[in-house]
Amino acid sequence: MWMMMLIMLLLLVSNGEEVGGSSGEVEDGIISRNLLANGLALTPPMGWNSWNHFQCSIEEKLIRETADAMVSSGLAALGYQYINLDDCWAELNRDSKGNLVPKSSTFPSGIKALANYVHSKGLKLGIYSDAGTRTCSNTMPGSLGHEEQDAKTFASWGVDYLKYDNCFNTGTNPKERYPIMSQALLNSGRPIYFSLCEWGQEQPATWAPKIGNSWRTTGDISDKWESMISCADENDRWASYAAPGGWNDPDMLEVGNGGMTTEEYRAHFSIWALAKAPLLVGCDIRAMDNVTLALLSNKDVISVNQDKLGVQGKKIKKDGDLEVWSGPLSKNRTTVVLWNKGTSSATVIAYWSDLGLNPTAVVKAHDLWTHSIQRGLKGNISANIESHACKMFVLTPQ
Ligand SMILES: *[C@@H]1O[C@H](CO)[C@@H](O)[C@H](O)[C@H]1NC(C)=O
Ligand SMILES: *[C@@H]1O[C@H](CO)[C@@H](O)[C@H](O)[C@H]1NC(C)=O
């Protein structure tokens, strides 16, 4: 405990410099960092969250089985580590001492036992609360005014991650409500990832890097193409604020929930990876089909998301429905997504000038979905792409 607090103190001191709006830029070869003093999220978090598939229908057996499936499917070995409860895990009211109480009908063994189980699988447990008087489902209390107590409760249970929602917020500005929980988590004696979920209302990218490991930039995603592309676009506006330690969050993945085609889900996963978004799976991983598993298991796409440089890729070109998204990676590499949002197949092209590459560069392109390699590319990369599909590459100068 004391050692941990000492480490936190050292992090606090070493991170004391303001980097402001230039966080995420590479200056003089030094990678800047966002500032939260818990030392977490040097790369975007990977894991699972209960909401997109199960909403309020969660209970401890489901969560244990999900942890089992995370390991047996091979996803855990690829870096997916958080098993995150969303809304509806607690009783309607606090106990006589003001503590949150796990719902006895659905979590009879309690959250500490669940955390122990999840930890025994080599995974981490996340929990959910709200910066208001009630959570969004209105089935449990929120943490507003109880931040220190709830943060200590979560720490005592062995919780590793908190998603903090924005319902029943008394009309108080999020810039006042969220820092209190951030500090309470830092005071709790346990490193707990802090995920702000104020839906992008007060431009959180401009203030949340100091207090959170990620901040939602959008309203809730739904399992539809239009929703997914709009989350990607809204999130993209804030790209320059992301950096190791603090990330923009366009909401959790819908891959595998059935509302989009395979190509739409491939684009969803590719763009989330390129944008350094949290990769929180939102389907029932106990019952994934092999296409879903193959999408979520692409090591090359995951390694773009987890690249140590930690610079969010962005939309760099738009020609009607044809888009190019790109960003720098470590080792002088560049990632590119050629994306056809139109209703019929089309050729999408990115020129070296679009990508900020030297005009004379000769490039090797690794296609992260077909695993094929093109060598000797000069001046551009292009592909014919089906409706709503994308191609994703890593370019390396030869
Ligand atoms: C999924 O399984 C089916 C039949 O079991 C097989 O035909 C198909 O190739 C598999 N797809 C992937 C992506 O593994
Ligand atoms: C794209 O680059 C290739 C060489 O890699 C070249 O043959 C082709 O003409 C270029 N296309 C355009 C539209 O510039």
Image (spheres, rainbow, N blue to C red):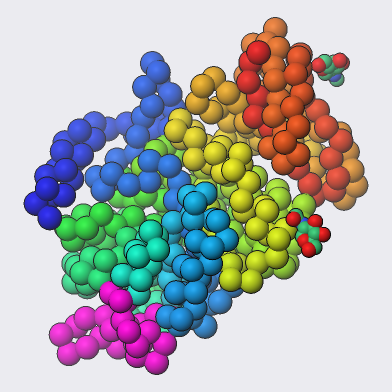
Whether residue 280 sits left or right of residue 367 in the image: it is: left
**Towards the viewer: 222 or 1:** 1
Q: Is residue 96 magenta?
A: yes
| 367 horizontally vs 26: left or right | right
Looking at the rendered image, the quarter that the C terminus falls into is: top right
Residue extending furthest toward the top = 360
Residue 243, compared with residue 199, is above or below; it is: above
Q: Position of residue 4 (x, y in %)?
A: 16, 49
Give the left or right position of residue 193, taking residue 254 as reference. left
Residue in the picture at 60% in, 26% down: 334
Which residue is the extreme one toward the front? 72
- Tally of numbered discs: 0
User: Which secondary structure is most common in the magenta stretch?
Assistant: loop
Q: Which residues are magenta?
A: 88-113
**294 above or below 153?**
above
Horizontally, residue 41 falls left or right of residue 230, namely left
Question: Between 373 and 209, which is closer to the camera in this rendering?
Answer: 373
Identify which residue is drawn at 46% across, 67% down: 67
- Furthest residue toward left: 2
Residue at screen point 12% across, 55% down? 1
Taking the magenta stretch, the answer to whether it contains residue 298 is no
Q: Is residue 275 visible?
A: no
The x, y position of residue 168, in whole percent, is 39, 75
Return the x and y of residue 180 as percentages of the image width and height. Answer: 24, 60
Q: Quadrant of residue 274?
A: top right
